[in-house]
Amino acid sequence: MTVSLPIAPEANALLNRSPLALLMAMLLDQQVPLERAFSAPADLARRLGHDPEAGELADYDPDALVAVFSERPALHRFPKAMAARVQSLCRVLVETYDGDAERVWSGAETGRELLKRVGALPGFGEQKAKIFVALLGKRLGVRPEGWREAAGHYGEESSHRSVADIVDEASLGEVRSYKQQMKAAAKAKSKA
């Protein structure tokens, strides 16, 4: 099983070989198009000249990391804030998982434990943690007992709610349509 998003092949390749890249992409998936967020780790790797490691980014000079994130085109709409979030994520990975991002999910025995581990990471609120659990289960075969329940409605079979459900341009369109419907419903509810 693999992550196969409608982005550059080298970006997909990095997401599939680097658990850190996958976590960073999910972290960056806010207030930018999904394609930008999930391509950013490959762009970061290109700028660094190698696949980034958690220890390296945790110890990186914060101003220098902001400069790398800010190079045009910027890795995110908010390069300074997201460079700091990536660095915070990497510091937790070093302190808690010896810098091995995959250990966030490889040792989880239940879906609830997996959700708790992901939700404890900087920048991963409840919804983002559930989406990531669904992504791990649906795309990468990380399926501890109860993972679908832990992922909530993002874990449902044949749904089109999040990045966990995207495999091509058509499914990307379905996810975008779902998100637009949710935004419209929330807007209508706030006016009522």
Image (cartoon, rainbow, N blue to C red):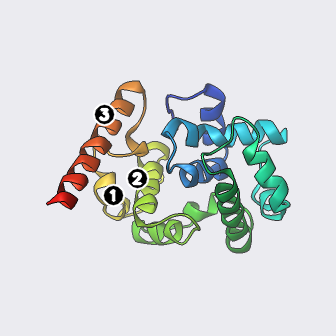
Q: Is residue 158 visible?
A: no
The circle on residue 134 is 2
Disc 1 target residue: 148
Amino acid tagged 1 = Arg
Whether the residues at callouts 3 and 2 have beta carbons within 8 Å, the answer is no
Left or right of residue 66: residue 146: left
Label 3 – label 2 distance at C-alpha: 17 Å
First reached walking from the N terminus: tag 3 or tag 1: 1
Q: Is residue 18 above or below residue 114?
A: above
Look at the numbered disc 2 and give the secondary structure of its residue: helix
Q: CA distance from mark 3 to mark 1?
A: 20 Å
User: Dot 1, how many residues are within 10 Å of its Cα: few (below 14), some (14-19), or many (20+)?
Assistant: many
**Which dot, 3 or 1, sits closer to the camera?**
3
Q: Are marks 2 and 1 in contact (CB under 8 Å)?
A: yes
Residue that numbered label 3 is attached to: 174
Image-quadrant location for residue 190: bottom left
Residue at image location 40% in from the left, 61% down from the top = 127
Q: Position of residue 87 (x, y in %)?
A: 72, 62
For the residues labelled 2 and 1, the Cα–Cα distance comes to 7 Å
Disc 2 residue crowd, few under 14, some 14–19, many 20+, Cα 10 Å = many
The quadrant of the rendering that contains the C terminus is: bottom left
Relative depth, front residue between 86 and 3: 86
Circle 3 SS class: helix
